[in-house]
Amino acid sequence: MASPAYQRVLLKVSGEALLGPESFGIDPNVTTQIAREIGEVHHLGVEIAVVIGGGNIFRGLAASARGMDRATADYMGMLATVINALALQDALEQIDVITRVVTAIEMRAVAEPFIRRRAVRHLEKKRVVVFAAGTGNPYFTTDTAAALRAVEIRADVILKGTKVDGIYTADPMKDLKATRFDSISYLQVLEQGLKVMDATAVSLCMDNKLPIVVFNLQRPGNLKRAIMGESIGSLVTV
């Protein structure tokens, strides 16, 4: 059997990915499916960390646009990510994958505070680590949190699970003529304003030469294929 192409990965999952067919909240079937995908990779010996968004519960930017103080709205969004992280932890531990939720905002009753060396130690002990509460600071997205945590734990790659199978010239849901990139550079992503991750996250990955793989997380087995190095989705690199 071939060896995984990556030994330590950071998986970015949007909060919207947990919706399933619903318009709000968490679909237990979806969290179970994502947990199984992660568990399959974990059993290969790959060290895996997850950064999860909170858009299925609360979007700080959207609330800010409606008049709420931006910092307050962002903190509320961070708390939503903690709810999602706990749901994913529960789904993982129900299939016997030991998991630690680590938050950028201290809430010791439900999760560990983020300490880089401790988080790395969890990974070395083959525990899945779910990073919640973004960076702990307003005005930063969970995309930026994913890039930051990936660099801090020295991940080999960021795997961004989405609803589409890669990066397109335009939104493939709206533009039937949109074409997919198999590979694209960080600079092209920034110059063309492609909606991969926000500019801060892409710039951080570029500065640290951290590759990004954008793929369809909803297709069973895709996470394993990405980690095994199969050509799925789109690769962002130098």
Image (cartoon, rainbow, N blue to C red):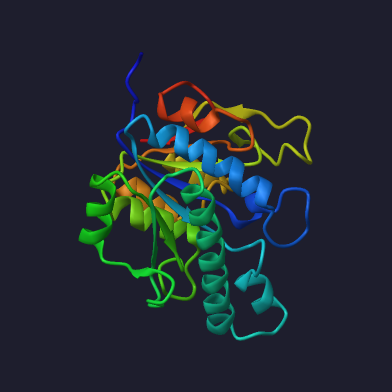
Residue sitting nearer the eye, 6 or 61: 6
Q: Residue at x 47, y 29 (%)?
A: 224
Q: Residue at x 51, y 62 (%)?
A: 86
Is residue 201 left or right of 80 when viewed as pictured? left
| Residue 142 is at least partly visible in this image | yes
Residue 27 image position (x, y, % from top left): 69, 53
- Depth check: 93 or 108 in front? 93
Q: Count all numbered tags in the image, as a single digit.
A: 0
Q: Is residue 105 above or below residue 227?
A: below
Q: Is residue 69 above or below residue 125?
A: below
Q: Quadrant of the C terminus?
A: top left
Q: Position of residue 66 (x, y in %)?
A: 73, 79
Question: For the view shown, which residue lies furthest in the top direction?
Answer: 1
Q: Position of residue 88 (x, y in %)?
A: 53, 54
Q: Is residue 28 above or below residue 134?
A: above
Q: Along the horizontal axis of the image, is 121 left or right of 180?
A: left
Question: Is residue 3 placed above or below 233 in the rendered structure?
Answer: above
Q: Is residue 233 visible?
A: no
Q: Identify the image quadrant of residue 212.
A: top left
Front-lying residue, 14 or 91: 91
- Placement of the N terminus among the 4 image quadrants: top left
Name the quadrant containing residue 201.
bottom left
x and y percentages locating residue 118 in the rendered image:
23, 60
Residue drawn 68% across the image and 40% down it = 170
